[in-house]
Amino acid sequence: MILGVDEALRFALQLHEAGSLAEAETLYRRILAVVPENLNALHFLGLLCHQQNRKDEAAGLIQRIIALDPQNADAHNNLGNVLEGLGKGLEAEVCYRQAIALHPGHGPAHNNLGVVLMAQGRVADAVEAYRRAVVLAPDSADFHYNLGNALRRSGDLEEAVVVYRKAVALKPEHVGARRGLARTLLWAGRFDEAAAVYDEWLRVDPGNPVVLYLRAACLGQGAPDRAPDAYVEHVFDDMAENFDAHLLDHLDYRAPTLLCNALAEAFPPPAATLDILDGGCGTGLCAPLLRPYARRLIGVDLSAGMLARAAARKAYDDLVKAELTGFLRGHAEAYDVIASADTLCYFGDLAPIVQAAAVALKAEGVLAFTLEDVGDGGPGYRLQPHGRYAHARGYVEDTLTAAGLVLHSLASVVLRKEGGQPVTGHLVVAKKRRETY
């Protein structure tokens, strides 16, 4: 049976929607072999390539559409999306602006323009782009959510609260909007309202461990001994794509540099002789600093999104998706160094993780990590409203001693900025005793 072009395209779309991507691609390409200028086949094949992360191929196909139809605003917008995914934000911005010039009422192009402007740190311009998107698509929860994020970043917490509430009203299952609303209320010191957001969220999604944890952090009661794995995975998978830019460009993040400088003081000059574990490696910000010392460098993290970013650095010998305490317990006397930047702040009770690290260290091995400071007169540790634990100096010292580790140094440092204010923490380096008989 021979299909006409229109029938073949409909069949290809059915295959595409059913998830039979290889078969759909074959049919799209057969259509284009017969009719190379078929815009629909080019469009859907480009979408398929984009879905499969074949972004360069997708860009080429969309550029063919633009060559055939230069006034196609959707194609310019789609090309912007692909270029943004390739990390070419400035080129994506040009595409979005071209789409808007061709079609000023193109809501998605205004929204996408806001995304790349935010990534460039042009927050005021991003706010204006998102405002226009919301005007053009007032029923879009996602556009309201993005505007709320930009307003929060700009410091306009009051309007951000209003916009987040609108996003939640439009789409009650929108996790990002609920989380953004609660976070903004916390930043504004409106703790009772933030708790009410979590209570309402639990009515929509009863028993959600992430929400229960955040509610405990907000209220300061009922806190677990550490953050649930589901919370850590969710938060860092969500942040992975823009994690480095956000921390380094907007928060003056210093923990990796501080940590590795402290290790440099504890070791001879780098000679690629040490077995090193980057515990809670995230996107691998510590990797370039640790690599010169490492014979073997292993990264461990709970977030698949973070590990994908870390893999792109090509600095690790292996990357493992695992909960850190369990991983350490399974690798006795395996490491000369365990480094952990801004990871143990998701543990309240440090005893299990520090004891596991002691097991995983070789004799005279070094454990180095950062924590947030609970402040003078505080308890041993406390879960803070933003979802991280802070620890007291004396508690840290006692925990290290109980695990058989000897404190080498414990310095007070500024880890980053948050809300424009410095976040003070502890920079800790400890050594494992060599057993004597």
Image (spheres, rainbow, N blue to C red):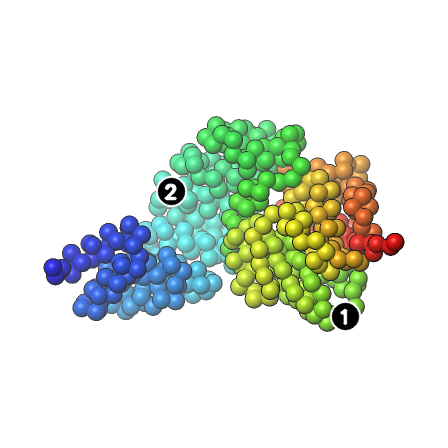
User: Which residue is at the far bottom?
Assistant: 271
- On the image, the x and y values in percent for residue 376 come to 80, 39
88 w.r.t. 378: above or below = below
User: Which residue is at the far front?
Assistant: 437
Residue at image location 64% in from the left, 35% down from the top: 224
Return the mark for residue 269.
Answer: 1
Can residue 343 be seen by looking at this rendering? no
Q: Amino acid at mark 2?
A: Ser
CA gap, disc 2 to disc 1? 56 Å
Quadrant for the N terminus, please.
Answer: bottom left
Quadrant for the C terminus, please.
Answer: bottom right
Say left or right for 164 vs 437. left
Return the mark for residue 106.
Answer: none
Return the mark for residue 140.
Answer: 2
Q: Residues within 10 Å of mark 2 (few under 14, many from 20)?
A: some
- On the image, the x and y values in percent for residue 169 come to 42, 33
Q: Earlier in the sequence, mark 2 or mark 1?
A: 2
Residue at image location 58% in from the left, 36% down from the top: 214
Residue at image location 61% in from the left, 32% down from the top: 216
Secondary structure beneath dot 2 equals loop
